[in-house]
Amino acid sequence: MRPDETTVRRRRRVIRSEESAPAMPAQPISKTILATGVDPMIARKLQQLRDYVRTKNYENLGLLSTIQIIREDGRQTIDFRSDRMTIARAYDKPDLLLLVTPWQGIPAKWDNSQEFCPKCLADCDVCKGKKTESCPTQIALPDEVCQAEGCTGKTGTYNPKCQLCRGTGIIKTFTTCKVCKGTGEKECSVCRGTGKYPTCVVGGDHSRNDVKKPDCPHCKGSGRDHKEIPIDINRFVNARQGTMLFLGPIEKITVQQLDGRTITIHGMPDQGKQYPVLAIEKDEPGCGAYFVGGVWAA
């Protein structure tokens, strides 16, 4: 286990849900459960969760990192690290977990390329925008034994009076650098000869060491250009009721706390053998998303 990761396997305090989730078996199902309307019990629970978020009756735990879901084809992970969704717990019910950031959909998978991010480039601080850096014109080769008469190569011992090796017993040899071809200048290895380097932060017009600036929204701090591969939400849907989608069953979630540490909270079946699920009002940006059902081990 990494030192910066706290796992709840060492101590498990059961967080009990007041009401059960929609009819979800503990084991993965082969087909999505459909219903024409939201169950009244679930509707009441969701309204209670909305009230907690609306009145800000919660304290932040950190940012949701991942949700691991059990599906019929195995465990699936939703990575939320690029969307920065805030997870919290109610003040008067610390065992009640809340998502207080509106639903924006499942983040697309990022396929980073090796090309620099074009949105946060600044002059390279190694070559200062010149595109080249200094290079030694000569490269040292392995030392050779001095072959002069009366010296190491002939006698096995060095001759302090040898004029060729100056009494060292070895001859130092050099060759012209193949990179700069003896010019003393080569393509800057940091900016790849472009004169520009991604700062990874908004604007790109200052030192990339300025940690006070927020991450570049295009590369999100990676410094690389990318392609976004959409993720089909149906891979994670376990039930539908009216316009609502229920993603799950949830086996565990990870949260990046405000101090930078990562904690893991495990989803477990309740007395009705139902795991926690993530209820989404409808699959549109700006809707509410809420954890319902099951129990949490933390």
Image: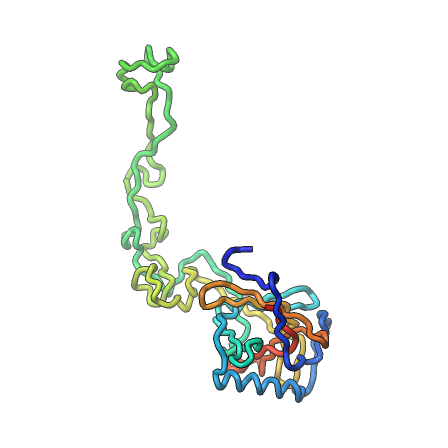
Q: Percent position (x, y) of residue 118? A: 38, 63
Which residue is pictured at 36% across the width and 48% down the height?
189
Q: Nearer the viewer, residue 31 or 89?
A: 89
Taking the spot 61% from the left edge, 62% from the top edge, the residue there is: 9
The colour style of the image is rainbow
Q: State the image quarter where residue 243 is shown.
A: bottom right
Asked whether 184 or 259 is in front, the reply is 259
Q: Is residue 239 above or below residue 65?
A: below
Taking the image as shown, residue 199 lies to the left or right of residue 91, namely left
Q: Is residue 111 left or right of residue 159?
A: right
Indicate the quadrant containing the C terminus: top left, top right, bottom left or bottom right. Answer: bottom right
Question: Who is closer to the viewer here, 28 or 108?
Answer: 28
Can you say whether 242 is above or below 209 in the image? below
Give the vertical position of 130 relative to 289 (above or below): above
Splitting the image into 4 quarters, where does residue 168 fall? Answer: top left
Residue 36 horizontal/vertical position (percent) = 68, 87
Q: Quadrant of residue 140?
A: top left
Quadrant showing the N terminus:
bottom right
Q: Position of residue 192 (x, y in %)?
A: 37, 51
Task: Identify which residue is drawn at 59% across, 64% down.
Answer: 8
Residue under the image location 33 percent in, 62 percent down: 210
Total marks drawn?
0
Q: Position of residue 163 (x, y in %)?
A: 26, 16
